[in-house]
Amino acid sequence: MGIYLLVIGEISILSLIQNRLRNTYLFVITLSLILLVGMRPLLLGTDTGSYVDLFNGIVNGRYWDSSLSNLFSGRFEIGFLDYVKLVAGFTDNPRFLLLSSAIIMYVPLAFYIKRESLNPMLSFLLFFTMTYFPQSMSAMRQSMAVGFLMLAVLSLNSRYRWWVPYLWIFIAFLFHRSAILFLLVMWLKRYRFTTKKAVMAVIGSIIVAISFTTIFTVLLKYIPSYSYYSNSIGHLSVKLALMMNISLSLLLLIIASMDKSHTESVNTNRWMLLLAICVYTISFVFNGFDRVAMVFLFAQIVLVPNAIAKLQDEKLRKVLNVLVGAIFILYFVIVLIYRPDWLKITPYFM
């Protein structure tokens, strides 16, 4: 766990230069994350072993169908398969698969924070102590897809090239099927986020949760590969994790509501955070679904820091920055100590 605390310390201490040397700060932290994730042991993380096995299988001549006919039926998405084949064409060392994937995950993150965040330090801290960083060492395909979705968000202001965000979403979909749900954001962002609409969305997610068994049965007819999750029933520990995630997301949504502006960016991020809460609600009856929240959750890392940064009261800004940072560092440390099965990233050195 010590190595993670060192990174948290680096993010916090180097923030002293984030205003004067913003690009340097972004570069140093991003490079640290790339090295931490790219140089991890080959079996660290829930799914890392399966990706290494896939890579070694391709190196040894095993055939993996990445044609369009296999778009919905395969265990691995065709974009990710072609990416692994590309890396395997240059080297037979799986280390380069982890390093190159880390670059795809974190370079978009750096650009996203650079352009969207008013407080890079708090953005990196939220990223590291919440779901995203642990998932990037486990759910590699989806984390790479999220990197492409960040680029989709950055391209939303390309009014004369309206198709660019959709192109990034499609590329993300080729790496992880859950990325297709980001089209909900493209639809909802046209509407102003209100408390009434938020309540309706949560009620809708509860209705979906109640009828999820029927919905999932229909879904399996079209995407048979999702049968992988068919026996994914939530245990008490999993439900506790979901309640924690919902509570923390609601806390961040409340903090974000301090920003009274209704810019397109703020509106879009609020919808994303609400969609993540809805996904967690559905996950109470189908815990394998909770990973989908990653598609939306990255809005938190700019929505909350920006809401705090826009406050006029300087003392309140400082207090909230410290309070939010302390809450999530504490959450991260407690989970690593008492519920390491939630994150599955310890011990780092295996």
Image (tube, rainbow, N blue to C red):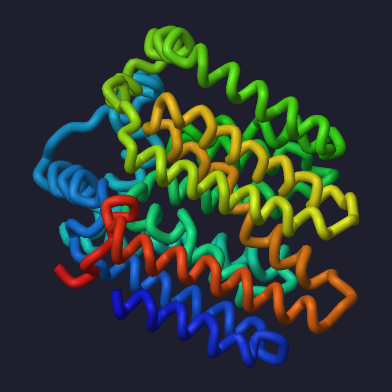
Q: Residue at x 30, y 79 (%)?
A: 2
Total labels: the figure holds 0
Q: Answer left or right for 43 relative to 38.
A: left
State the image quarter where residue 19 is shown. Answer: bottom right
Q: Nearer the viewer, residue 200 or 338?
A: 338
Q: Residue 295, how many percent across, how many down?
A: 54, 42
> Vertical placement of 97 versus 222: above or below?
below
Q: Answer left or right for 123 relative to 232.
A: right
Q: Residue at x 63, y 73 (%)?
A: 323
The extreme left residue here reads: 60
Q: Residue 166, how many percent across, how many down?
A: 66, 36
> Vertical placement of 52 versus 80: above or below?
below
> Vertical placement of 350 versus 270: above or below?
below
Q: Residue at x 38, y 58 (%)?
A: 134
Q: Nearer the viewer, residue 2 or 151?
A: 2
Q: Residue 307, how many percent across, how many down?
A: 78, 63
> Vertical placement of 324 versus 343: above or below?
below
Q: Nearer the viewer, residue 205 or 94?
A: 205
Q: Residue 193, how many percent across, how many down?
A: 82, 39
State the image quarter where residue 239 is shown. Answer: top left
